[in-house]
Amino acid sequence: MTTTSTFSPALTPEVARATAPIYDRLRNVIPEIEWPVHAPWIARINELKQQHNAIILAHNYQTPEIFHGVADLTGDSLALARQAVETEADVIILCGVHFMAETAKILNPQKTVLIPDLDAGCSLAASITAEDVRLLRQRYPDVPVVTYVNTSAAVKAECDICCTSANALEVVESLGSERVIFLPDEFLGLHVAEQTEIELIVWKGHCEVHERFTAEDLHSYRKQYPDIEILAHPECPPSVLKEADFIGSTSGMIRHVGEQKPNRIVMITECSMSDNVAVEFPEIEFIRPCNLCPHMKRITLPKIFNSLQKLEFQVEVDSEVAKRARLSLERMLAVG
Ligand code: 13P
Ligand code: SF4
């Protein structure tokens, strides 16, 4: 696959002019020497979007040149699912991982949904299959099954309702059941279980990015910066969450920073979050421990350009699977 065959990225005066306002916002997170590499792609992608009536949805973990340079809408998994339903565009390019693009396709079967790299997976989605869910149902008949959206369409189709890290507690409590099967993220499940009387049967899947943080990491930040505010994603292990001042989805963390405006923070999550949020809050000091999501990082500007130019890679979901998975997603969207 060549991504540059019909386009030679060059920082012409026109490109420099068109992208100057974008770089003004990003100069704290992208070194000046790197900008000539990004700017031509950004300018060309923004032109192509208009030609194809396309919209770019980007997850909060996308790099700042994507997040602030070409994305039309950004957010956590829940916001991206909602925005996918509301868009008038003909083409949706999902800059995130495969389950997010699949969710957009399931909610928009008539639209073209593209992902710039088909191999952008997720360790949680890979931790469970539809067959696993069928076996769980046999073992626990009559116990409703909640699945985190970080799963394949086939898994969603076997479950009763989806949730994200932003609404997991509300979804579990909406079912009116004393016991609920919660999959596949063990740590998110344990975090929900701490806040409810409902008994959760949890699958033991983990996020390969968040499981690597340790309570010792957090202790050392507190020791070094006694006034630090620690924000953590609920995919982190319980010992890490215990040490955090705020626990929330990626957008929940951004909202918290905007409301509380702490002087100094550390975000216990994927690397690009701090960069993207620092653009909005230059007055806050971000301490940056860095765990990269290798799947999110497969998405790059040249691949987005390729995706728009060739209208690839189209995300398709078997229609029977999509019909059942859509029910799980729509039930979640009805809860909140
Ligand atoms: P959010 O829904 O909080 O954005 O999380 C998605 C994800 O993949 C976190 O690792
Ligand atoms: Fe999956 Fe973790 Fe990457 Fe999120 S950060 S996409 S949960 S592997």
Image (cartoon, rainbow, N blue to C red):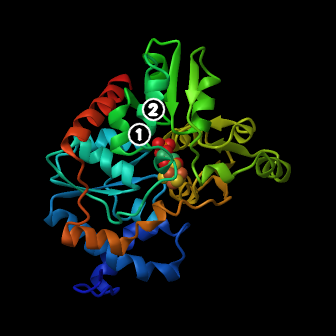
Q: Which residue is mark 1?
A: 131
**x and y percent of residue 126 in the render?**
47, 51
Q: Type of residue at label 1?
A: Glu
Q: Callout 2: few (<14), some (14-19), or many (20+) C-alpha neighbours within 10 Å? A: few
Quadrant holding the N terminus: bottom left
Which element is circle 2 on?
helix
Quadrant holding the C terminus: top left
Q: Which mark is residue 201?
A: none
User: Which residue is rendered at x = 62% and y = 37% of the image?
Assistant: 187
In the image, 111: left or right of 15? left
Report whether residue 130 is seen.
yes
Q: Which of 24/38 is in front? A: 38
User: Which residue is rendered at x = 34% and y = 42% of the image?
Assistant: 154
- Mark 1 CB lies closer than 8 A to ligand 2: no
In the image, 221: left or right of 134? right
Q: Callout 1: few (<14), some (14-19), or many (20+) C-alpha neighbours within 10 Å? A: few
Q: Which mark is residue 135?
A: 2
Report whether residue 25 is seen.
no
**x and y percent of residue 233 in the render?**
59, 42
Instruction: Tell me, yes or no, whether the two marked residues, 1 and 2, touch with CB atoms within 8 Å.
Output: yes
Q: State whether residue 198 is above or below residue 136.
A: above
**x and y percent of residue 181 in the render?**
50, 26
User: Which residue is rendered at x = 32% and y = 65% of the image?
Assistant: 116
Within the image, what quadrant is residue 10 found in?
A: bottom left
User: Which residue is rendered at x = 33% and y = 76% of the image?
Assistant: 41
- Mark 2 CB lies closer than 8 A to ligand 2: no
Q: State whether residue 322 is above or below residue 17.
A: above
**x and y percent of residue 232 in the render?**
63, 43
Which element is circle 1 on?
helix
Q: Type of residue at label 2?
A: Leu
Q: Which of 210/15 is in front? A: 210
Q: What distance separates the C-alpha of mark 1 from that of mark 2?
A: 6 Å
